[in-house]
Image (cartoon, rainbow, N blue to C red):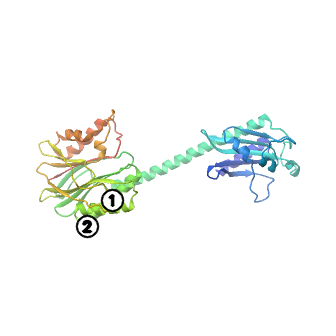
């Protein structure tokens, strides 16, 4: 901030008696320093400031450095001799434990003679008074405090902007999600979802294909947070369109997989379960793309987990040929599908929830509404916290 730099340099000059001062910032990338601002009444217009690199190098260690070159004395560095420096101070500016800049002042031989009345009070070979060094160090510390406050204000501003962006992303995500419970094309369903962060990486949708067929899919994007949420929205939109256009779940998954492989990062993939429910035949034609987290809750309280041969997660192999399988749901049967946030949720002792606890939790349930509520609450009870480790989604679907 140039306003802060100007205040600091004026205070340093007025209180120390030096006429040349500079506020410098370390530039490790080029192994040098960057001039934030300098005041040099002896410099020609357009001339860049010059500083003792050896002095700055010593100040990088975190302590004030004082320099006095005696007349005829040896041992001074080449830069000091070339610049004709006779007295100099360099105070590190530390924000926390890090040296982020330097307050640099020096006086050079003959300058006080060339600028009468310029305010220089140090003799050419004069010593640095103890109170002068203490004053300069105090100015450097006040500068560090001000820089720390500026950094804090900038950080708070960035956090506000980030929260605004996250809120917009969350609102967009809510807009493309179906309601938590509804009747659609001969189906009834209920769903519960909770994100591991501000936005979720789980995807869930219900898509009407025709008068009798309805597609339902639930997927889990690897990772969580903004990047997972963006990939989730992309996959959900593309899969929705492919289903409406093609109607075949295996083909829709293959087309979506090609799109994800082409556009997503190589370390991003999506596990997915998708089923097309036919209200006339009471069958579900489904594809399990590396998901595996689903079961059928039969009427009477017995739940069965399935191992399907559908394929691998999306985003790994663009040429993979996904296959579908078909199962039949009887009266009162529900298909319950959930994300890995359910089975992989750890308890306080580190043990995971796992599929066996899901089967056990669903035993007393008999409707889609109670399926979603009971299983989700069982995970929360097991975790003993409302802050779940990952995005968690539970959905139960049945024919009316």
Q: Which residue is depicted at the point 28% across and 42% down?
A: 343
Kindly identify which residue carries mark 1: 317
Quarter residue 176 falls in: bottom left
Q: Crowdedness of circle 2 by 10 Å Cα count: few (<14), some, many (20+)?
A: few
Kindly identify which residue carries mark 2: 245
Of all residues, the one furthest to the bottom in this rendering is 245
In the image, residue 391 lies at what x, y percent? 34, 46
Helix, strand or loop at label 1? It is loop
In the image, residue 238 lies at what x, y percent? 32, 62
Contact? badges 2 and 1 (CB < 8 Å): no
Judging depth in this view, the residue of 48 and 261 nearest the camera is 261
Q: Which residue is depicted at the point 55% across and 48% down?
A: 154
From what the image shows, is residue 339 above or below residue 266? above
Left-right relation of 18 to 363: right
Q: How far apart are the two marked residues, 2 and 1, measured between alpha carbons? A: 23 Å
Q: Which residue is depicted at the point 81% across and 48% down?
A: 81
**Closer to the eye: label 2 or 1:** 1
Residue 164: mark? none
Residue 313 seen in render: yes
Quarter residue 269 falls in: bottom left
In the image, residue 182 lies at what x, y percent? 22, 53
In the image, residue 275 lies at what x, y percent? 21, 56
């Amino acid at each position: 901030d140039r306003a802060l730099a100007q205040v600091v340099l004026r205070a340093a000059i007025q209180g120390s008696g030096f006429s040349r001062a500079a506020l410098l910032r370390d530039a490790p990338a080029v192994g040098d320093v960057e001039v934030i601002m300098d005041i040099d009444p002896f410099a020609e217009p357009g001339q860049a400031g010059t500083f003792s690199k050896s002095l700055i190098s010593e100040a990088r260690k975190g302590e004030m450095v004082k320099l006095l070159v005696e007349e005829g004395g040896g041992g001074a560095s080449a830069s000091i001799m070339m610049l004709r420096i006779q007295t100099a101070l360099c105070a590190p500016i530390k924000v926390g434990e890090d040296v982020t800049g330097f307050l640099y002042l020096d006086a050079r031989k003959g300058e006080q003679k060339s600028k009468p009345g310029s305010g220089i009070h140090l003799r050419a070979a004069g010593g640095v008074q103890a109170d002068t060094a203490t004053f300069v160090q105090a100015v450097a510390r006040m500068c560090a405090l001000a820089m720390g406050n500026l950094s804090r204000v900038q950080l708070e501003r960035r956090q506000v902007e980030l929260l605004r962006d996250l809120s917009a992303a969350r609102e967009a995500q809510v807009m493309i999600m179906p309601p938590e419970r509804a009747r659609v094309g001969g189906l009834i369903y209920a769903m519960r979802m909770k994100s591991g962060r501000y936005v979720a990486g789980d995807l869930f949708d219900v898509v009407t294909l025709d008068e009798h067929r309805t597609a339902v899919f639930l997927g889990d994007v690897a990772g969580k947070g903004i990047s997972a949420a963006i990939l989730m929205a992309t996959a959900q939109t593309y899969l929705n369109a492919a289903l409406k256009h093609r109607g075949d779940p295996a083909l829709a998954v293959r087309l979506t997989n090609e799109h994800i492989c082409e556009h997503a990062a190589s370390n991003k993939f999506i596990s997915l379960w998708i089923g097309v429910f036919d209200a006339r035949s009471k069958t579900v034609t489904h594809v399990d793309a590396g998901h595996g987290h689903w079961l059928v809750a039969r009427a009477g309280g017995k739940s069965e987990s399935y191992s399907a041969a559908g394929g691998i997660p999306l985003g790994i192999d663009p040429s993979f040929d996904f296959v579908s399988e078909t199962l039949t749901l009887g009266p009162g049967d529900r298909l319950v599908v959930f994300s890995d946030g359910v089975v992989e949720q750890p308890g306080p002792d580190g043990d995971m929830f796992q599929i066996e606890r899901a089967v056990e939790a669903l035993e007393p349930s008999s409707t889609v509404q109670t399926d979603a509520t009971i299983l989700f609450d069982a995970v929360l009870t097991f975790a003993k916290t409302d802050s779940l480790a990952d995005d968690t989604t539970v959905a139960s679907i049945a024919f009316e």
